[in-house]
Structure formats: structure tokens, C-alpha cells
Image: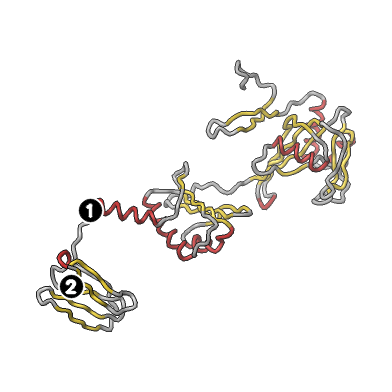
Amino acid sequence: MIIKFLCRTPFLSYVTYPRNSFFSSKRHFFSSHPATLISFCKNQGKLTKIRYSIYLHTRSSMSCSVTPAMAREKEMEQVDRILDAKEDDYGGVTVEMTNEPLDPSVFGSLLRASLSHWRQQGKRGVWIKLPIELVTLVEHAVKEGFYYHHAEPKYLMLVNWLPGTANTIPANATHRVGIGAFVINERNEVLVVQEKSGRFRGTGVWKFPTGVVDEGEDICDAAVREVKEETGVNAKFVEILAFRQSHKSFFDKSDLFFVCMLQPLSFDIQKQDAEIEAAQWMPFEQYAAQPFVHGHELLRYISDICSAKLEGRYTGFSSVPTVTSFSEKNTYLYMNGNVRTNSRGNP
């Protein structure tokens, strides 16, 4: 038999309970409103309404044992209400949000439930990749302990360290990678440019073509690309002659600059009008004799290395195609050509 109690409150329309399984003694049910107390006496079989001007919470003396099956079902219900995430190799999870609209309050509730679940699982770092369309969700994530890790044009990456131990999440990318191209022809002429912008604008200084390595681009390919873009000259990468590391440069990031030697495959110059004021083939001795080169220690070192290379007194690092052991991705190892190889041709 089913008994229904009708309670006219804004929070509860009716309560339904199986009679035999629940009513073993006198029960009281309370609304969350200046309440109507409804008493039911099994022996008397009648309802009594008493109004109270106080707020009370729902209570019951019903005893209900929770079986393992019920606990598992409850856990699965909770899992259904958390954010979808992928486990990483470091004991953490990553949430990749789609650009589908999501109410911020709903996101906040899902995030709190998810964090509770992940803490129970002993997860460490939690990453949220948030597309730019969902920027309104940032505030809720920050309130739950997330902070900015890095940003790209189309997304923001947030992270939260859950354990009470020291945070071991690595910082955002710390270095920018650039190249300088030493392109020398058979007449000992070096390819040089004058720039329209930057610190060399209007100085009359002739310099190597330079540029920044793109994301996912190899150093050797970047050198070839920059020479082509700035001068129109096709070239072949030969080796890395040297590299320099500096700090607090581009947006306070560190900087790695690789001096690369290239062999020209064409000689006609078609300069890039947007960035390059002039470009030409210049005798190397004339390049090295510039006051600007003589007046800067770093440029003197680079000039001396290039000169030693031309005279056969210096060997740089050539690119050797290889495959990584972990991800099986194609990559390059830059190594000195004097290293002997084993019978399989490997160093």
C-alpha cells in the first residue's frame, strides 16, 4: 500500500513511502519553510497538522542498511556527474572541454564533484583545457584552486595540484628557440640582410638571416625556411656550428639561439619586402670587419667560429635522423661528424 502526504510548501509537493517498510512507529516530517509538522500514528491511522514558526530540517529514524551493491550504484551515479577526463602518465588527469555552451553554475557543480572524486582516487595534477568560447568558466575554476599554466590563441590551460605535498607540476615552456643562418657560397661570400624593424633598423648593419623556430619545426628545417623567406635563396642545412642561451628576453622567457651553416642551392636574391630592407652576397672578410661585429663579443665569437669552419679547423653538429624510444616519433640528433658508428651504422 502507498500512502501520500500532501505538503503545500514551495519545496515539496508530496512524499510517497511504502507503508509496511517504513511506518514502524510515530514519524515526523518537516518542511524547510516555517513549517507544517505532519504527524502520522500507525495505531490511530490519522493525520495531525501542527504549524511551527521555526525552520527545521528533514529527519527520520528509519534504519536502512547500505549493501555493497547499493554503494557501487551510488558510486556510479556520482561518476556520471563528473567531468570526462583522461588519465596521464604522472598520476593526474586531463579534461578537454568542448566549445559547446555550458552554464557556469553547472560547470562549478560538476567541477566540485569531480575534484572530490579525483581526490578519493589519489590523483595529483588536474589539467583543464578550456577553449576560448568558454572563457566565462575561468572564474569558477579559479575559485576551486586552479591557476593559469599557459595560453594559446584558441585555448587556456588551467591546472590544479591536489595533494598536500610540494607542487611538482613543471612550469610553462621556458625557452624560445631561434636560428641564425650562415649561408656561404663557393666564392667565400656570405648571405647577409639589413632589417626594416627591430634593434638593427636604420643602423646599416649587415647580419645573418635570423628567425624563430615554429612549434613542431626542427631546427634544421627552420634555418632553411628563414633563408628562403627573407632572401628567396634555396639552401641546404649542413650543421649547427654553435648555440647561445640567454635569459629574461622575450616576455621574460629564456632564449636558445642556434648558429646554423647552410649551403646555397640557388643564388638569385628576392628579398622579403615586409621585413628586409636589403639583402646581398658579401665577402666574408667584409662582413667580419664591420665595426658592429668587432664591438660585440658574442658576434666576434660567432665570426671566429665561422672563419675556423671555412679553414677546416672546426667541426659542428650535423643532423642525424632517428626515432625516439618512447613515442617512436621521427626526430633529429645533432652530433659531431667524427663519432664512429657500429656495424649497423648507428653511433
Q: In the rendered view, tell whether residue 14 sits above or below residue 298.
A: below
Asked if residue 207 lies left or right of residue 127, the reply is: right
User: In x, y percent, where is residue 307?
Assistant: 82, 30
Q: Is any atom of residue 166 visible in this view?
A: no
Mark 1: amino acid: Thr
Q: Earlier in the sequence, mark 1 or mark 2?
A: 2
Mark 2: amino acid: Arg
**Quadrant location of the N terminus?**
bottom left
Q: Marks 1 and 2, how far apart in space?
A: 25 Å
Q: In the rendered view, tell whether residue 46 sits above or below residue 288.
A: below
Q: In the rendered view, tell whether residue 101 sits above or below residue 260.
A: below
Q: Secondary structure at mark 1?
A: loop
Q: Which residue is mark 1?
A: 67
Pointer 1: residues within 10 angstroms few (<14), some, or many (20+)? few
User: In x, y percent, where is residue 177?
Assistant: 68, 42
Along the line of sight, which residue is nearer the eye, 338 or 264? 264
Q: Quadrant of residue 331?
A: top right
**Quadrant location of the C terminus?**
top right
| Numbered badge on residue 27 | 2
Q: Residue at x 89, y 28 (%)?
A: 187
Q: Secondary structure at mark 2?
A: strand
Q: Residue at x 12, y 73 (%)?
A: 42
Along the line of sight, which residue is nearer the eye, 302 or 4? 4
Q: Is any atom of residue 204 visible in this view?
A: yes
Q: Residue furthest top?
A: 343
User: In x, y percent, where is residue 296?
Assistant: 81, 42
